[in-house]
Amino acid sequence: MVGEPIDGEILLLTAAKASVPPSRLPTLIELVQDHLETDIRRFRKTRECIFEDPDRVAFLTEDGFWETVGADLELTDREIDAVRRAHTEQLRRIGRQTERHDEFETALEIRDPIFISVSSGAGD
């Protein structure tokens, strides 16, 4: 699953900036994906969907969301920061590709994005 729901280039960029070993980031993304995937139906009802394509869906979350996920998964502060950064950079990349950069940057001022892979059927 490496690279989903986060593109491989984003993983490389984030790993270069994060304070976690580059080899650890794909494992963290996969761990978080497995955790988030279980709640996708609830997210669809309770969170704003800011982007969706056949492979992944992105929601905006409240402040403190990543800290809660990190606590649930027993992640360190650096690991939480790396995962948050990967999801944020993925949204920025999609914003540039879809000419929605300004809209996404405004959203990032007050909320964090989460990406969940739906290619495995989790989007139902």
Image: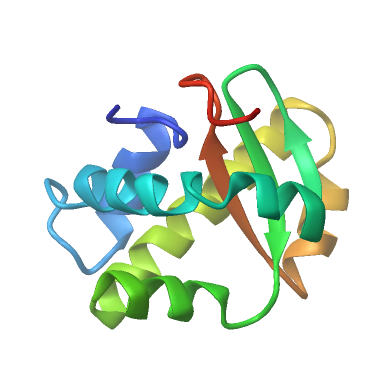
Looking at the picture, tell me which residue is in the foreground, 31 or 111: 31
Identify the residue at horizontal 35%, vertical 74% (top origin): 72
The quadrant of the image that shows the N terminus is top left
Q: Is residue 117 visible?
A: yes
Q: x, y percentage for residue 17? A: 32, 60
Looking at the picture, tell me which residue is in the foreground, 28 or 72: 72
Say above or below: 78 vs 92. below
Left or right: 43 as drawn, with respect to 114 = right
Q: Please say which color scheme the image uses.
A: rainbow
Identify the residue at horizontal 38%, vertical 31% (top origin): 9
Q: x, y percentage for residue 79? A: 27, 69
Q: Is residue 75 visible?
A: no
Q: x, y percentage for residue 44? A: 75, 47
Looking at the picture, tell me which residue is in the foreground, 6 or 40: 40
The quadrant of the image that shows the C terminus is top right
Identify the residue at horizontal 33%, vertical 48% (top origin): 29
Say above or below: 88 vs 115. below
Q: x, y percentage for residue 105? A: 77, 58
Left or right: 35 as drawn, with respect to 77 = right
Identify the residue at horizontal 65%, vertical 36% (top origin): 57
Say above or below: 56 vs 86. above
